Image: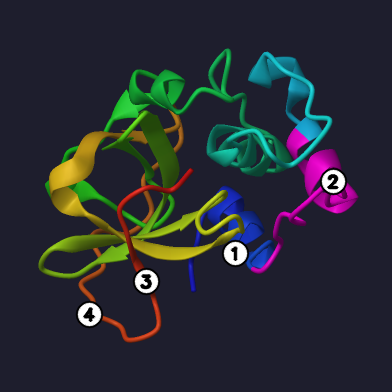
């Protein structure tokens, strides 16, 4: 696979999850705090929405500065360069509307109705999810970084959940 570095990093985190209750996943908290300079927050627990912090940590691992206040998913909607939906490629940053806020994750592919997204805080974990393409509000790419590849057409995949609220 010819993934950009930030998507390859994100895929290696698949399965990292929150710990329910008063104990927290210190590995996850440390990962989120690698981008603390941009996030606008310091994570002390895994209860706070963390999709934006995860996206920021992945880009920082690839040597790319994320947006200011990256912890807010909405901050990603104007970051970098716009990428038309017919030009999406693995690693594109997708911002979705959701009840009570927004969600951000990385494009892995798409089927007829859903984007297949690698992201944090999807089912309280770093995971693959299918998110309705009607919820997309922005698709972005790091400015000055060449887009690698193009849209990845997928069939609907059993086992990858369709989500409606990623918080």
Labels 4, 2: front one: 2
What label sits on residue 22 in the rendered view?
A: 2
Specify whether residue 31 is painted magenta: yes
Q: Marks 2/3: CA distance?
A: 27 Å
> Mark 1 to mark 2: distance in Å?
27 Å
Q: Is-magenta flag for residue 17? A: yes
Residue 61 location, x and y as percent? 72, 42
Q: Which residue was labeled with disc 4? A: 156
Mark 4 or mark 2: name the one nearer the start of the chain. Answer: 2
Residue tagged 1 = 11
Relative to 91, residue 37 above or below: above
Is 100 situated left or right of 134 in this image? Answer: right
Residue 65, position in %: x, y?
62, 24
| Mark closer to the chain start, 1 or 3 | 1
The residue lying at 59 percent from left, 55 percent from top is 124
User: How far apart, in angstroms, are the residues tagged by discs 1 and 3?
Assistant: 17 Å
Q: Nearer the viewer, mark 1 or mark 3?
A: 3
Give coordinates of residue 7: x percent, y percent.
54, 55
Please tell me which residue lies in front, 50 or 78. 50
Q: Are marks 2 and 3 in contact (CB under 8 Å)?
A: no
């Amino acid at each position: 696979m010819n993934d950009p570095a930030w998507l390859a990093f994100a895929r290696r985190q698949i399965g990292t999850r929150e710990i329910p209750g008063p104990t927290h996943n210190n590995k996850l908290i440390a990962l989120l705090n690698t981008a603390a300079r941009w996030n606008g927050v310091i994570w002390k627990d895994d209860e706070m929405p963390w999709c934006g912090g995860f996206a920021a940590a992945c880009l920082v691992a690839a040597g790319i500065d994320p947006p200011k206040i990256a912890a807010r998913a909405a901050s990603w909607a104007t970051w970098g360069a716009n990428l038309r939906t017919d030009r999406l490629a693995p690693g594109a940053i997708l911002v979705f509307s959701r009840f009570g806020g927004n969600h951000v994750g990385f494009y892995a592919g798409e089927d007829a109705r859903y984007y297949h997204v690698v992201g944090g805080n999807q089912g309280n974990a770093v995971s693959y999810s299918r998110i309705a393409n009607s919820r997309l509000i922005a698709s972005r790419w790091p400015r000055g970084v060449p887009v690698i590849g193009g849209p990845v057409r997928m069939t609907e995949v059993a086992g990858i959940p369709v989500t409606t609220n990623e918080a």
